[in-house]
Amino acid sequence: MKFACPLLLAASALPTGAFIVQKPQLAHRLKHPASTSQLNFFWKKKSADVKADDDVLPDPERTMTSPSLAQTHMQGPLTVNGSGKALTREELDEVRKDLEKLKKEYDFKEPVRSFMDEEDTKWIFGGPPDYSLTNYLYLKERTHIHKPGSLEEVVENLVKTWEMERSHKADYKQHQSVDQDRFAISANGGKVFNNAEANEIGNYNALLNACPADIWDSANTSWEQSHDKFHEAFAAFPWEVLEVYSGPPKVAFTWRHWATFTGTYEGNQGDGQLVELFGFGTAVVNDKLQLCDVEIFYNAEEFISVLRGEKDVESVNADWNSGGANCPFAALVAAR
C-alpha cells in the first residue's frame, strides 16, 4: 500500500529552510528559512517546570546492556564483514575522528537532543547515549540540510529528543519532550496509545501496531523483544525531516528513516544495501513545544519485506525520489 500526502492540500504554505543534497554532491539548493524564533526558546534551555505527578508511580526501572553507549539498540557492523558484531572501540574512535573532520570541513552541526544531562535521570543503559556514530551517518547521508533556526530544524530536533528519551530513559515521567497528560501516538490508523501505554510497549510496537501479525506481532512482542529484533541489522538508524508544511500547534511534515543493511534480520543477511522508510506525519504541540498528539503514516510492510529478503530495495519506495525525497503527492500537485 502506498501512502500519498493529502496534507499538502490543506497545509499553509510556509517557507522552508533547507539545503537539499543530491547524492553524492553536497548542498545545491537553498530556500529561505521559516521564522521560528518564537519556537526555539524551549529547546535552548533545560526545562525545570516539567514535574512528574506525585500520584502516578513510574514504571519499574528498565535496564539493559550494550557493547557501548554508541550502539545501544543498533549493534550491527559498519560494513558487511561477516562478523555480525558491533563496532570495536578502535572503530568507534575512527568514526568520531571522521565526524569531527566532517563538521570542520563543511561547518556541519550535530543535531540537538535536549535533556541529556538532567540530574537523577534513570538511564536504561546506565548512562546517556553516545550519538557520535548515528550523527556521523546522519550528517554524511542525509538528503536535506536545514538552515539553522528553520522550522524543519526545530521539528527534527524535537523528534530526535523524543526518540532519545523513549529509547534511553527508563522512567517515562522524566521524558520532557512530551506533554505527560496529553501525549498520544498512532501509526497508519492503528491503536492510539497514551503516554504510559506507548512507553510500556516501546516505539517499535506502537509504530508497527497496524501491521498484520505475520509482519509484526505487536500484541506478543515486549519492549525488549521489539528492540532485540533490530539489534544485529544495522550499525545505526538515522532519521531526518524532509519538509514541514504547517507550523504549530499542528505540525505536518514528511520524513525519511534509513540504514545500511550490514547485519542480519530474522536470519537474513544483508549485503550492504541502503534500506529506506519514507512517510508523513502530524504532531500537535503545546506552548512548550512538547508533543501532545502524534500520527504517523508509512509503508511498514515493504520495509520488513526488504529486511526479510522477500523484496529488493529497487522494488520499494517507487513513489519517493531519494535524491530529493519529497512527498510523492507533491509531484502530482506540481504537474497541474
Image (tube, helix red, strand yellow):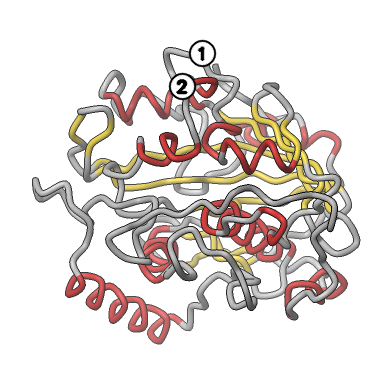
* Quadrant in which the C terminus is drawn: top right
For the point 45% across and 30% down, which residue is it? 317
Q: Disc 1 marks which amino acid?
A: Pro
Q: Is residue 30 above or below residue 188?
A: below
Q: Which residue is mark 2?
A: 216
Instruction: Point out which mark residue 318 bears.
Output: none
- The quarter holding residue 72 reads bottom left
- Residue 59 pos. (x, y %): 64, 48
Report how far apart the C-alphas of labels 2 and 1 lie in the structure: 6 Å
Q: Disc 2 marks which amino acid?
A: Trp
For the point 61% across and 66% down, which residue is it? 146
Q: Which residue is mark 1?
A: 212
Asked whether the beta carbons under mark 2 and mark 1 sit within 8 Å of each other, the answer is yes
- Residue 299 pos. (x, y %): 53, 26
**10 sits left or right of 133 in the view:** right
For the point 70% across and 23% down, which residue is it? 191
Label 1 Cα neighbours within 10 Å, binned few <14 / some 14-19 / many ≥20 = few
Residue at the far bottom: name it: 104
Q: Is residue 40 above or below residue 267?
A: below
- The quarter holding residue 153 reads bottom right
Label 2 Cα neighbours within 10 Å, binned few <14 / some 14-19 / many ≥20 = some
